[in-house]
Image (spheres, grey):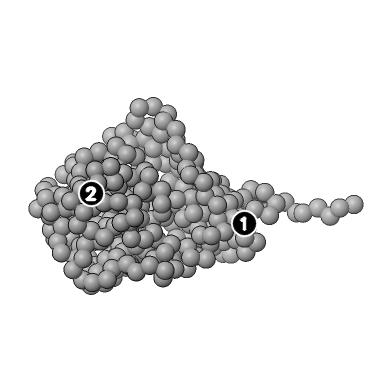
Amino acid sequence: MASLVPISSPVFVSTDTLHSILTHQTLINHFQSYLPKTSTSIQSPMRQSYEVSSSSSLLLMPSWSSSPSFPYIGIKLVTHFPQNTAINLPGVQATYALFSSTTGQPLASMDATDLTLYRTSCVSGLASKYLARPNSQVLVMVGAGAMAPHLIRAHRSAIPSLRKVVIWNRTVEKARILAKKMQENDDGMLQGVSFESSASLDEIIGLGDIVSCATNSEVALVKGEKLKVGAHLDLVGSFKHSMKECDDEAIKRGRVFVDNEAAMMEAGELVGAFERGVIKEEDIVANLVELAAGDKVGRTNSEEITVFKSVGSALVDMLAAQLVYETYTRVSK
């Protein structure tokens, strides 16, 4: 009789457990280490996106590994309901399922709403390591939604010299509330950082050594002419042609980097810039894997403006889920 492979029940990692496992620093370090090692062995087809209604969508993001040393299959199911902010719910919600690529067994499922917040912000944090000035002191946070606190922590993890955060949001009160909440937070990651909010984005853009944007905007918020010399612009929000967080001048002034090639096909800022002849696809300097592997150089001097556009990928989803699963099973033994 053939021997049977023991089957264990898949684990469920709750949001509370996820928070106890992950820190922005550990996930940034994990990405920095694993992106170069796994990018060639993990297959990540283009995400599938379906319009559920005129204002909402469903995204499927699968990936699988062909390497025995990284034996995983994973898929993230994501809903995007931007109108949820009006009822105090996240605009993006998700779940992640992890399987064995050796046997196909389900290994884990986890609430990927917060996993997405961690992975997205830590991709930006890792990019800042290569693209922001290492002595950056002021972060301008454009947007005060669920992503904003994560981006603030990720950028501080990557650039410990940050000492001041100025928050802007279309709804001024949301920016004020977030600034107050972050100032009152007593975790060590934000020690020594001051927080304030502003009603005028144009007035504060020029203050930012790093300008990080996480909005659903379909009109340019950041005007390139306002960026200071040596600034790093981090664009997180857009993932459709109709969305954009900065104008053409910002793209034109900066050396542009992406998290992966999908950004050049999906992000409104880049697609529009290509169509209008502001830059060409070959002007994109590098992607995040190339930066992490040392194949391409990020910032080359203290005066250039750098722009990083991310749209997310199944690869970083899987790496984040791997870290959560392996940490969870290790500490549970």
Whether residue 153 sits left or right of residue 228 in the image: it is right
**Image height check: is 123 above or below 248?**
below
Identity of the residue drawn at 28% across and 42% down = 275
Can residue 99 be seen from the camera position used here?
yes
Whether residue 169 sits left or right of residue 27 in the image: it is left
- Mark 2 belongs to which amino acid? Val
Label 2 crowd bin: few (<14), some (14–19), many (20+), radius 10 Å: few
- Mark 1 belongs to which amino acid? Ser
Whether residue 327 sits left or right of residue 294 in the image: it is right
Identity of the residue drawn at 62% across and 56% down = 66
Q: Which residue is mark 2?
A: 278
The location of residue 270, given as percent across then percent down, is 30, 47
Foreground residue among 183 and 237: 237
In the picture, which quadrant includes the C terminus? bottom right
Identity of the residue drawn at 21% across and 62% down = 305
Q: Which residue is mark 1?
A: 66
**Image height check: is 102 above or below 35?**
above
Identity of the residue drawn at 38% across and 44% down = 265
**Image height check: is 16 above or below 28?**
above
Quarter of the image for residue 171 reads: top left
Foreground residue among 285 and 98: 285
Can residue 117 be seen from the camera position used here?
no
Mark 2: secondary structure: loop
Label 1 crowd bin: few (<14), some (14–19), many (20+), radius 10 Å: some
